[in-house]
Image (cartoon, helix red, strand yellow):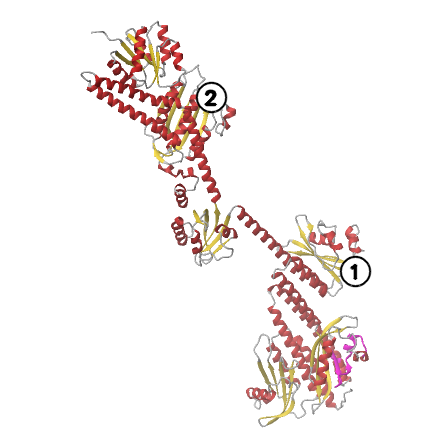
């Protein structure tokens, strides 16, 4: 059996943590959800993670904060940002910093799949 | 014509006795002073019976002011068996008959078996007062002297009776005149006392005279009055020396009285007519006329004359008696004048009119060619003001107007200051005024004597001065002083009354103006009588015709139908007990406009224990409409600020909606895929569908909260849990706060009591405070952006909410302006937030304030009452908590 790629989800919103892993599994990925950037950083999943789906606005460390932190740690994980703030200025900024994609909530499963495929191609 | 007399010894005695009797008669009026007509009649009859040696004498009085007609008869003691009073009265009544023209009857007649001589004598010219009848069995009755005595007695009785009548009339004069009447009566008594003394002296002289001279001439001459004897043709035959001396004319000159100035020119035509008619008819005459004294002064006399007849009824001569009634006339004139002045005052004539009449009255009655002036004083100056001096030219009075009242300017100033009369006999020589310009002023107008008297009020304050001037140096007589005393008293009544009326009018005008300006009317309501009195303004408020009689029915016709129950309830409560009450109700006017009235009433009981209410009614329609408009405006402002706050939160709100939407879309994707799989994962599909429903509800909740905050304008009151309301606000703002990297700490106390108020408005305040706190920390980088929101019990019955930030803090200079509208420190703010927040909290009977923290930042707090008690937050609608007001509120909401 082909080992599934692990996609990690970091979002403070519980319904995202609840629903997104199920969809990812249906799409053929392994999935794990974290409620904060800090939780992800202290977990054992960093190195296994092939793609990171990361919420931008979170209490404490934000999505971009985590992106910087991972860069500092030289963890080259492709990141797909998701955000409920439809702020068009955010998208080019995070892409410039190396993100694969930035999706505005709510996003379709197709858009997610395309972003993941792109991310995994990068890696 | 010379009277023929015999000289036997007994005749001398007879004349001597006659003389004594006559003198006694003349003294009678003095004795009668102050007597009743009854007393007068008794004395008269006793005297006649004794002096004329009569068998009986009878008096009938028919025309008295204060008594019924009466008959009185006296019978000599020795004749009491013969003449029984009752039969005698009947007999004499028949003998006299009804014809008043038959005044002087004299005949022998039969009374039973007795033959008696009867002589009747009228009281008054034609028996208008009554009649005297004297009877004697003597055949020679009456002799000349007896006729004369009887005539004089009748005359004296008439004077006495008229004086008694005058006295009675005087008693009827108003209370103010009592003093004056007493004074005049005393004067008359004093005059009579003098007269009596004179009589006594004369009597001694007369007795000495009578011893030697026994002729009627001497009797006439010796009489202490003015007597003239006339021929049947009316020509003056004899005037006694007293009369001659008084007139200062010879007998020859007196004979020409009909063409000379002996009788006052104004009286002469009337006198001549009466005299001529009497002489022609033979009836006695009786008139009042002014007769010239030797020095040119006219005095009033009563002139009566009786014809003396022989046995055949032929007139032998006329006996005329002139009685000086000048004092009485003066007293009458003065009384009449004073009465007229008092009537002018009582009938409300203007003060200048009354004072002018008062001056003229004194000028006419003071026995001197004088001018009078009244100078009221305005003590605010003090200055003389509104001077009245009708007989002096304006050039005299004008400079006095506004003149400062001081001791050294004029006698009037001195009199006013010293409160005493100042008599300047001659201003030219009086050293007190030598240095005063007033002296020149007076002299320039041809005046010399100045008598100034202060006009004092009952309380003793000086109201003005009364001044009498004459062109010659003069000092006042006692009579003039009395007159001045009397008129200054009247002047004080007039001035005080005028001042009182002016003050009353002023106060009434103030009241009416005050009522008009404040749209307030006053009323009184006598509960027992049902009598309702309204002020003019109240008529205007109710829009009723002035002077319409106000009844409860009339009021009910205007009261708003929805307030009728309330009104009836109030009236019932007011009837049952004296209490103070106030309430509001509405009127429905004929044009269907609505007026709001606020009524305050105070219940009192009068001395009879009857209930009466007095109160005020204010038309508060304008205020009420303004309050309504203000409320509406406030709601709109609150709404606008709320919408603006929410606008700033758009991103946050989008986040709130997008989160559940995102969950829905993701779950839906999963659901479809699991169902497409082979075999389908039904359990997971069911789980995702459940999540879709949950997230859908979550999104719907956000929309509902938003709609509540965006949409609502009108204020409503409900019981609410403040913590729950705060949590909703936090839910809406949370992501905004997060975005601003604000660390929110909530410390909401458990078990807070409910508060009553407007949920959305209170949430708006919380939202404002959170946003302000967040904005205050937007530039803070050196410390955590910590925001604490806390609720707690404040005192026992209040809840306090605190929002504490760690931001830039408060500028102490700006603390005062913090809550002003349009005050802002933000670039994009309108500065309405705190102003609206404070007004919302105040309408919840609460308080909103700010304070700097000990450390960085500021703390904003509000405190509002908790529990249903604060349900009286009716003030949020600007009405007073009365039944009517609540009613009105309901109507306002559901017009």
Q: State the extent of the magenta-drawn residues as a range.
A: B222-250
The C terminus of chain B, quarter of image: top left
Q: Is residue A64 left or right of residue B1?
A: left
Q: Secondary structure at mark 2?
A: loop
Q: Which mark is residue B771?
A: none
Closer mark to the observer between disc 1 and disc 2: 2
Residue ID for mark 1: B473
In contact (CB < 8 Å): disc 1 and disc 2: no
Q: Nearer the viewer, residue B718 or B234?
A: B718
Q: Is residue B445 above or below residue B632?
A: below
Cα–Cα gap, marks 1 and 2: 96 Å
Q: Is residue B338 left or right of residue B756?
A: right
User: How many labels, in total?
Assistant: 2
Q: Nearer the viewer, residue B380 or B613?
A: B613
Residue B224 counted in the magenta span = yes
For mark 1, name the chain: B
Q: Which mark is residue B809?
A: 2
Give coordinates of residue B646: x percent, y percent. Answer: 41, 26
Earlier sequence position, callout 1 versus callout 2: 1
Q: Is residue B103 left or right of residue B676?
A: right
Q: Residue furthest bottom?
A: B113
Q: Is residue B623 above or below residue B746?
A: below
Q: Is residue B834 above or below residue B778?
A: below
Residue B862 counted in the magenta span = no
Give coordinates of residue A109: x percent, y percent. Answer: 29, 16
């Amino acid at each position: 059996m082909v080992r599934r790629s692990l996609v990690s989800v970091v979002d403070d919103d519980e319904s995202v943590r609840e629903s997104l892993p199920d969809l990812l599994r249906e799409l053929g990925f392994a999935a794990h959800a974290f409620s904060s950037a800090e939780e992800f950083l202290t977990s054992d999943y960093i190195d296994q993670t092939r793609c990171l789906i990361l919420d931008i606005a979170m209490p404490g460390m934000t999505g971009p904060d985590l992106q910087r932190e991972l860069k500092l740690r030289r963890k080259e994980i492709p990141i797909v940002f998701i955000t409920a703030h439809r702020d068009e200025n955010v998208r080019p900024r995070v892409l410039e910093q190396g993100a694969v994609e930035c999706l505005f909530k709510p996003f379709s499963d197709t858009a997610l799949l395309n972003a993941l495929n792109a991310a995994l191609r990068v890696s | 014509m010379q009277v023929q007399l015999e000289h036997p010894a007994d005749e001398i005695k007879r004349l001597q006795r006659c003389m004594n009797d006559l003198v006694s008669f003349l003294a009678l009026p003095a004795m009668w002073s102050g007597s009743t007509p009854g007393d007068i009649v008794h004395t008269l009859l006793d005297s006649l019976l004794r002096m004329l040696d009569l068998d009986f004498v009878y008096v009938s009085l028919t025309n008295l002011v204060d008594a019924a007609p009466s008959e009185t008869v006296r019978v000599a003691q020795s004749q009491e068996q013969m003449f029984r009073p009752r039969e005698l009265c009947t007999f004499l009544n028949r003998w006299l008959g009804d014809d008043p023209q038959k005044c002087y009857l004299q005949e022998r007649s039969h009374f039973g078996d007795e033959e008696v001589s009867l002589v009747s004598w009228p009281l008054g010219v034609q028996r208008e007062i009554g009649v005297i009848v004297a009877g004697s069995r003597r055949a020679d009755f009456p002799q000349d002297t007896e006729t004369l005595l009887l005539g004089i007695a009748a005359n004296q009785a008439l004077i006495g009776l008229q004086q008694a009548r005058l006295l009675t009339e005087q008693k009827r004069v108003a209370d103010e005149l009592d003093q004056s009447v007493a004074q005049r009566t005393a004067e008359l008594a004093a005059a009579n006392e003098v007269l009596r003394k004179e009589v006594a002296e004369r009597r001694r002289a007369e007795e000495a005279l009578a011893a030697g001279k026994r002729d009627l001439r001497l009797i006439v001459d010796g009489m202490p009055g003015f007597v003239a004897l006339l021929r049947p043709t009316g020509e003056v035959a004899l005037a006694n020396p007293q009369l001659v001396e008084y007139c200062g004319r010879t007998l020859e000159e007196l004979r020409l009285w009909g063409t000379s100035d002996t009788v006052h020119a104004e009286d002469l035509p009337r006198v001549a007519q009466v005299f001529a008619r009497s002489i022609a008819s033979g009836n006695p005459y009786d008139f009042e006329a002014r007769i010239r004294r030797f020095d040119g002064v006219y005095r009033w006399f009563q002139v009566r004359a009786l014809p003396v007849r022989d046995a055949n009824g032929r007139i032998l001569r006329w006996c005329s008696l002139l009685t000086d009634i000048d004092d009485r006339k003066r007293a009458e004139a003065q009384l009449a004048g004073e009465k007229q002045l008092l009537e002018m005052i009582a009938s409300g004539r203007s003060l200048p009119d009354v004072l002018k009449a008062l001056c003229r009255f004194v000028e006419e009655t003071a026995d001197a060619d004088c001018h009078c002036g009244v100078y009221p004083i305005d003590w605010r100056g003090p200055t003389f003001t509104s001077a009245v001096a009708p007989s002096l030219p304006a050039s005299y009075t004008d400079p006095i107007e506004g003149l400062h009242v001081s001791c050294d300017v004029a006698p009037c100033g001195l009199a006013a200051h010293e409160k005493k009369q100042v008599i300047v006999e001659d201003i030219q020589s009086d050293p007190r005024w030598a240095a005063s310009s007033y002296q020149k002023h007076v002299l320039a107008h041809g005046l010399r004597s100045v008598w100034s008297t202060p006009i004092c009020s009952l309380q003793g304050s000086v109201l003005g001065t009364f001044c009498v001037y004459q062109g010659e140096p003069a000092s006042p007589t006692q009579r003039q002083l009395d007159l001045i005393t009397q008129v200054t008293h009247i002047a004080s009544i007039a001035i005080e009354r005028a001042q009182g009326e002016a003050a009353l009018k002023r106060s009434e005008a103030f009241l009416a103006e005050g009522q008009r300006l404040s749209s307030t009317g006053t009323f009184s309501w006598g509960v027992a009588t049902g009598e309702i009195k309204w002020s003019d303004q109240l008529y205007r408020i109710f829009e009723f015709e002035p002077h319409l009689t106000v009844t409860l029915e009339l009021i009910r016709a205007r009261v708003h139908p929805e307030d009728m129950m309330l009104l009836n309830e109030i009236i019932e409560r007011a009837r049952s007990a004296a209490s103070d009450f106030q309430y509001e109700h509405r009127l429905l006017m004929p044009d269907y406009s609505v007026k709001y009235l606020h009524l305050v009433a105070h219940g009192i009981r009068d001395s009879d224990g009857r209930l009466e209410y007095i109160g005020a009614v204010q038309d508060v329609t304008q205020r009420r409409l303004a309050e309504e408009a203000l409320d509406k405006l406030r709601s709109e402002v609150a709404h606008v600020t709320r919408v603006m706050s929410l606008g700033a939160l758009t991103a946050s709100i989008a986040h709130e909606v997008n989160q559940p939407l995102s969950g829905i879309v993701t779950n839906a994707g999963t659901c479809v895929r699991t169902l497409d799989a082979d075999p389908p994962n039904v359990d997971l599909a069911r789980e995702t569908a459940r999540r879709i429903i949950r997230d859908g509800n979550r999104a719907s909740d956000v929309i509902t909260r938003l709609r509540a905050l965006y949409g609502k304008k009108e204020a409503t009151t409900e019981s609410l849990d403040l913590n729950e309301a705060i949590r909703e606000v936090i839910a809406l703002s949370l992501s905004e706060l997060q975005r601003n990297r604000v660390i929110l700490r909530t410390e909401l106390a458990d078990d807070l009591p409910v508060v009553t108020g407007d949920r959305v408005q209170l949430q708006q305040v919380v939202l404002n405070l959170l946003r302000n706190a967040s904005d205050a920390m937007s530039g803070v980088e050196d410390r955590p952006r910590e925001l604490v929101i806390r609720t707690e019990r404040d005192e026992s019955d209040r809840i306090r909410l605190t929002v504490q930030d760690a931001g830039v803090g408060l500028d102490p200079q700006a603390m005062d302006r913090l809550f002003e509208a349009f005050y802002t420190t933000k670039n994009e703010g309108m500065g309405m937030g705190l102003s609206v927040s404070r007004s919302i909290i105040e309408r919840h009977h609460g308080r909103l304030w700010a304070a700097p923290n000990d450390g960085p930042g500021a703390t904003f707090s509000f405190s509002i009452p908790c529990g249903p008690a604060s349900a009286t937050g009716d003030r949020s609608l600007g009405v007073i908590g009365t039944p009517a007001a609540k009613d009105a509120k309901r109507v306002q909401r559901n017009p």
